Amino acid sequence: MPIIERVVGKKEKKGKRISYKTTAHMKNAIKYILEEGKTDDSLIGSVNLINKNNAFNEFVLNKMTYNKMPKSKLDTSKRMIVHFVQSFDPKDPNITPELAKKIADEFASSIYFKEYQVVYAVHTDAGHIHTHFIINTTNVTNGKAWQQTANELEAMKQLSDKIALSYGISIINDRSKEKGKHVENAEYQAEKRGAGWKKEIFHICKEAKEASSSMEEFVKLLNENGVKVRLSESRKDITYMFNDKKINSDKLGFPKRGFTPFTKEALAKYFAEKALNKPNQNLINNKEESNINKDDKYNTNKQYLYALDNIEKLLETDDIKNDGGSVGHSDGSMAKMFYKEESKKSKGIER
């Protein structure tokens, strides 16, 4: 399986570590991962971007929309991006740049990056194939800053493992002290500790949970996949049974790290939040039919694209800079403001 590492930043000449808190840091990081010679266009992907090769400009425009840009070049109060690297074992004969890109595409399409702009690239210039992911810390729908707990990071790593395993990728045993050791069977280390069956139950539970909208559906899917469940109102814990083995829910996961996602309490919370966040499709469809004007949508997109092409001017225009409050992203307000100002100066630009 690949290793997922979060990159804090390189050290400067003075030994101080860069933590991606300036526009320059953001620009340099994106420029680095897209650098010709390290990758090529077929190995580059993106999420929530119009043009993957214009990632920096789109990152900036989204941050300006929500007033998340630094107030000056010296302002380091905001983290601009998050940087992850997904590395593969150089001894694994199955991994290729194309397969690494396929794994990256699936990983980047997960729920963790759903509302954030992401640009990623597979690098082939080093001794091992690896993929860089740069995430804009500003949410595209509400402007909220990227937050990630230790549990969420662990879950992200597990997802990376699961995707890689589905393609037959072998292990880099990075969680022991034997870094870089090649292991043929993905379950080898777990089975050596007598924990292979626990890992299998965990992954079956994870898939069943994601595919369910209630506890009843969850239990039904588990039964269909060979996991029996002992669940009752009088019992605090759930017991999962698989191939003559059983484990209580408070032991399934990483209890020492506080990550036990299949307890009765955790599942009840998960399904309640899922029900709360489920959109009413009929209301959405009615709203779209009654409120969306195709010409307005076209003009908004055109204004947004124009602002992207002129991002340097947008950064330099004093009266277009954020005034302390956010502006609506969905209707392209920031782009519209800039487009309107520039249209006054140039003939032939449609207003």
Image (tube, rainbow, N blue to C red):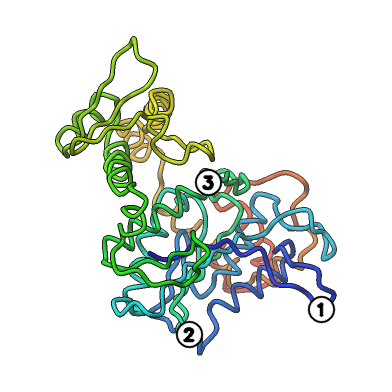
Label 2: which secondary element: loop
Which is more toward the observer, 121 or 95? 95
Determine whether, in the image, residue 201 is placed left or right of residue 124.
left
Label 3: which secondary element: loop
Give the quarter of the image for residue 209.
top left
Residue 23 lies, in percent from the top left, at 72, 66
Disc on the earlier residue, 2 or 3 = 2
Give the residue displayed 76% in from the left and 67% down from the top: 17
Disc on the earlier residue, 1 or 3 = 1
Residue lying furthest top: 234
Which is more toward the observer, 281 or 111? 111
Give the residue displayed 32% in from the left and 74% down from the top: 99
Mark-to-mark CA distance, 1 and 3: 38 Å
Mark-to-mark CA distance, 2 and 3: 39 Å
Residue placed under numbered mark 2 in the picture? 127
Residue 331 lies, in percent from the top left, at 53, 49
Residue kind at label 1, given as amino acid type: Lys
Q: Nearer the viewer, mark 2 or mark 1?
A: 2
Residue kind at label 2, given as amino acid type: Gly
Give the quarter of the image for residue 252.
top left
Residue placed under numbered mark 1 in the picture? 13
Residue placed under numbered mark 3 in the picture? 141
Residue kind at label 3, given as amino acid type: Thr
